[in-house]
Amino acid sequence: MADILQNASIRVFNLETPIADNRTPIEKEAPGFMAPSSCAIGLKKINPILLTLANNHILDQGFPGLESTKKSCRTIIFLISALVIILKMPKNRFYGFERKE
């Protein structure tokens, strides 16, 4: 898997959980996901060009969890934007949507 990731020209991942160290769960029937901020180090190692956050779990820890996730991602200095892909390959588009649970 490491070879595949290292040789890929585009690495796009969906972060299926908020990154936070403090629990601020929303009310919902399904389990609320959360990963510690130390997980951001692993994200840096896979070197994503795009990391999407739009999914049904990104708000499991409410807006504080979303803000913590964005802060963790900025801390390790990688791009969370489709802008680079769109500029380099204008025919490609990435869309993400989050539904309310």
Image: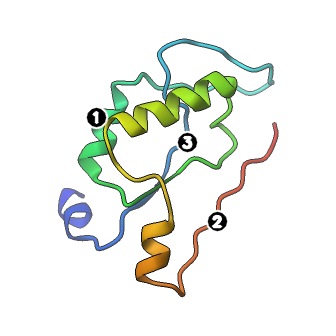
**Cα distance in 3D space between marks 1 and 2:** 25 Å
Residue at the disc numbered 2: 95
**Cα distance in 3D space between marks 2 and 3:** 15 Å
Q: Which of 83 and 61 is in front in this view?
A: 83
Q: Which of 40 and 17 is in front in this view?
A: 40
Q: Is residue 95 above or below residue 101?
A: below
| Image mark count | 3
Q: What element carries label 1?
A: helix
Q: What element carries label 2?
A: loop
Residue located 47% across and 26% down the image: 35
Q: Are marks 2 and 3 in contact (CB under 8 Å)?
A: no
Res 85 quadrant in image: bottom left
* Rendered image: mark on residue 16: 3
Residue located 35% across and 56% down the image: 48
Q: Quadrant of the N terminus?
A: bottom left
Q: Earlier in the sequence, mark 3 or mark 1?
A: 3
Going by the image, does 85 lie left or right of 58? left
Would you call the spot at circle 2 few (<14 residues within 10 Å), some (14-19), or many (20 or more)?
few
- Name the spot of residue 100 as percent of width and height, x first: 82, 40
Which residue is the extreme one toward the bottom? 91
Q: Is residue 21 above or below residue 46?
A: above
Q: Which of marks 1 and 2 is nearer the N terminus?
A: 1
- Name the spot of residue 53 as percent of width and height, x first: 57, 47
Q: Is residue 63 above or below residue 7?
A: above
* Rendered image: mark on residue 18: none
- Name the spot of residue 83 as percent of width and height, x first: 49, 67
- Name the spot of residue 32 as percent of width and height, x first: 65, 24
Residue located 29% across and 74% down the image: 9
| Three-letter amino acid code of the residue under disc 1 | Ile
Residue located 81% across and 36% down the image: 101
**Cα distance in 3D space between marks 3 and 1:** 16 Å
Residue at the disc numbered 1: 41
